[in-house]
Amino acid sequence: MHIRILFLFLGILIFESSCKAQEIRVYKEPIFANDWSKPSIHPDRIILNPGQNPSSEMNVTWRTTTEIEVAYAEIAPATAAPKFWRNAQTYTAKTENLNAKEVPMAEVEANYHSVEFKNLQPGQLYGYRVGDGEHWSEWFQFKTASADPKERFSFLYVGDAQNYILELWARLIREGYRKAPDADFIIHAGDLINYAHREQEWHEWFTAGGFIHSMLPSLSVPGNHEYNYLNNSNREAGRALSIQWKPQFTFPINGPEGLEETAYFIDYPDVKFIFLDSNRDHEKQAAWLRNILKENKKKWTIVSYHHPLFSASSGRDNEALRAIWKPIFDEFKVDLALQGHDHSYARGRVSLGENVLNGTNLRDLTGTVYVVSVSGGKMYGLNPNAWEGTEAVRDRAAENTQLFQLISIENNSLKFESYTAVGELYDAFELAKNEDGSNTFLELKTDLGPEYRFENTIPYEDQLPSEIESKILKKYSGYEIRRVIFKEVEGQTRIELRIQKGEIQKILLLDSKGKVLSEN
Ligand SMILES: [Fe+2]
């Protein structure tokens, strides 16, 4: 055999074996005992959130049982000498009771304690701990933002964690922290969990992040999954923000009235970060956003919210939202929009015009760059037409890939990198700020290899072995296979098969050899 053909053949074999599941494998999801997520007298879910001015303000929030009615935080500049606490200052926490015993899926009562550290020194490493005076957490460390507008800093950004949070988001957030342990903070662009009020899922989210939440400050916006009915039998009140959201986070209260802790901003020396709640009050937030941006003198402006203005996946266009917010982004030259919701990856931009033969090459300049990303384990297909017919061009995309993003800003340069859950660089670009406030766009994805799709990655859905597939399609002629689910029933491996012919749908239960055991 010709050597090149042999290599090609070997390549195909390796590709096939890495993408194709070879056997029927039933995946066992973890079950969490009822008391797993319950609070104790020891502080847990300790999370940092930046204050409005991250050079001098940092907030910490934690949880205990209701027995703990008075709580404290201690903070001191961190040094290598272990008794750095001699210089500590003690803050008394604000304590808030959350009684959600009657809320389905929450069924918990807890006290949440929060402290806003003020008058911190810029660019300073601090140690802090929280407790009730007897039961204390370990000492955690964080660094305040520099006051120097030219100094480099970086942050992480992730899309929806939402599903299989402890199972699969844990590795992603931990890989992100390993890649960028010196990042200043992390942005969570909504749908942190799946069912807004469910204690177990919040506990998964806090457990997956572990000490990262206590050391790398979080900035989060609510997604649609952070809103749900408090009581399913009384839906008239509408969907409510996750009952844990406000007690468990301490975001700056500087947003529009009625959207406290879901729309807000923070100020880096030369970067404005604005967080919006895309679930509601779009017009009200537009007016607020316009006011903020009118006064904004900072070099860079970055916005984050959940529902993308340019959607990555089919049938998920947010036209109304785009019509309200995009003109403001355009007018005030928002540099970057960090979004979630679509369970796939898409990065692209609005151009300022077409290329011209003479003069400035307008395609090299760019309007707002839009990114949709996903960090958790739930995956949707990409819109096959990319962003055709919209004002934006999609430049890089992915399906079936868990990603985190690392963004670093140094004076006139903003560098954006997207990494997969195993740490491979998947996407990159750079923005260079010009004198007139416009951005020159530098594409850096060029050497990063082909895009991921469902077809060239390990299957997301269970795949019916081909011999069983042909047997079934022969028996049920004219039917199409809609869904395959491997499951265990009374200790036996079974295949649940959803098949369809026109309007007729059937659910079959097969044994592992493909014999039909039941038909509905
Ligand atoms: Fe969503």
Image: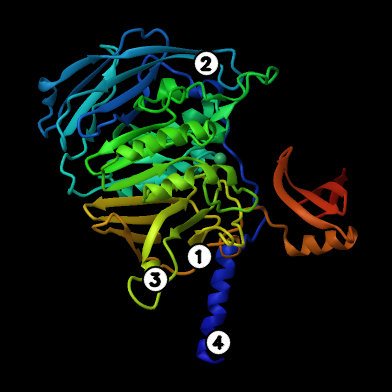
Give residue 316's position: percent from left, percent from top: 62, 48
| Amino acid type indicated by mark 4 | Ile
Instruction: Specify the quadrant that holds the C terminus.
Output: top right
The amino acid pointed to by label 2 is Val
Residue under label 2, please give it. 108
Tell me whether circle 4 and circle 3 mark residues in contact (CB < 8 Å): no
Q: Quick one: 210 or 55, which is closer to the camera?
A: 55
Specify whether tag 2 is near ligand 1 (CB below 8 Å). no
Q: Is residue 149 left or right of residue 288?
A: left
Residue carrying label 3: 447
Query: Which numbered disc, 3 or 2, marks the residue that appears first in the sequence?
Result: 2
Q: Classify 270 as above or below 205.
A: below
Of pointers 2 and 1, the one earlier in the residue sequence: 2
**Residue shown at 29% from the left, 40% from the top:** 296
Which residue matches tag 1? 451
Cα distance between the residues tagged 3 and 2: 51 Å
Marks 4 and 3: which is nearer the front? 3
Pointer 4 residue Cβ closer than 8 Å to ligand 1: no
Q: Amino acid at mark 3?
A: Asp
Mark 4 vs mark 2: which is more N-terminal? 4
Q: Nearer the viewer, mark 1 or mark 4?
A: 1
To which residue does mark 4 refer? 5
Residue at image coords 14%, 31%:
121
**Neighbourhood count class around disc 1 (C-alpha, 10 Å): few under 14, some 14–19, many 20 upward:** few
* Residue 455 spot, x, y in % from top left: 61, 64
